[in-house]
Image (spheres, rainbow, N blue to C red):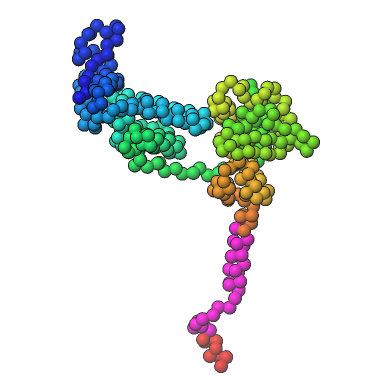
Amino acid sequence: MLNLWRRHTRKCPHDSREALKCQCPIWIDWTTASGERIRKPLGLRDWQAAQRRARDMEADGLTAIASPKTLKEATDDFLKDAESRNLKEATTRKYRWLFNSLESFCKEQGLVFLNQLHEEQIRSFRNGWTLAPRTAGKHLERLKSFFRFCQDNKYLKESPAAKLKPPKVNDAPVVPFTEDQVKKILAACDEYAGNGKRLKALTELMLATGLRIGDACTISRDKVISSKEGYSIELYTAKTGEKVYCPIQDQVGQDVESIPGTHPFWTGESNAEDCAATWRKAYVKLFKQAGVEGHCHQFRHTYATRLLQAGVPLDTVSIMLAHSSVKITQKHYAAWTKERREKIEAAIRKTWDTNATRAKAPKSGTPTAHQLRDRRKTA
């Protein structure tokens, strides 16, 4: 049987373990079948709510478990496992953000143990997200991954998130910058207050390489290589870990080299995500100043479509973009390939020729009334 008691703070004037007017935290206390005594905070301060929670916990059979896992213990175990698997810091940071949000939700609901989370609570937690569909889908994947981990380690019998369906995601169309827009953006860099020179060099670098802003803004000087043939960049991308090698114009390489520091666009003190977020904010102001609507990822689209329109094969473009599979490149950029456009254009022109030939050809079939009359006159 579960026993409730208040754990009074030093400043609390009450001393009774069941003081109704006291706002000190309520704890639970019970002894398992093996004789082990367990004390855990319940996460509630209202005595009647605590009694209801205790009855629910007894109904769920929590007292029969030798050592039930709290949510905090389970999330800590998951993060330790993630570190041992050498997951990237960016990935573990997203898990921490999710777990902090889940723990805040459970605290409001008075939920302490992992076994208390059912589909209803998880669905309510998910419904409180104010995220874009794609981001919400990624968060749901992480949530399901956490509960699968709990199942595998016998913390739970079944996952409360198993039946939750991901939101529908509509892929945004690929919209590269036009050459006129590129000229306006580069011209606006010259008039940009503060770090206009660095902003222009970063813009030129992304247009010349197709790097994501996270890779471009954190690039180190040793990744920009100068040789007899000219300048090039060589690095491993942060997202896929794929190696990128790309020759760049001498002017772009010289502009990057002219910026002092080990990292031309990064202090190296903050994390990479914060650095990218700072530059994204700068581009919002730059685009507004240039009178151009868009976002900095469109530099990558512009680079890819320039290559494809110049006749570069799709699989080569996939390598230059450091995609893990050519299918990803085909999904987003197939419509821009020169070969495909030429085939479509030839097929359409062929229909024009076919229709014109049909219009000139004599009609066959049942003769009209005029044709019959002319035949009689001739006979």
Q: Is residue 208 left or right of residue 20?
A: right
- Measuring from the top left, give residue 60's x and y in whole percent: 24, 32
Residue 51, image quadrant: top left
Residue 260, image quadrant: top right
> Looking at this view, is 11 or 285 the one in front?
11
Residue 357 within the segment the image draws in magenta = yes
- Measuring from the top left, give residue 105's x and y in whole percent: 34, 27
Residue 312 within the segment the image draws in magenta = no
Q: In this view, does 87 lie to the left or right of 223?
A: left
> Looking at this view, is 288 or 268 the one in front?
268
- Measuring from the top left, give residue 71's x and y in whole percent: 35, 27
The residue drawn where x is 45% and y is 28% is 80
Residue 213 visible from this viewpoint? no
Residues in magenta, as a range? 344-371
The residue drawn where x is 62% and y is 35% is 236
- Measuring from the top left, give residue 47's x and y in whole percent: 21, 19
The residue drawn where x is 44% and y is 43% is 169
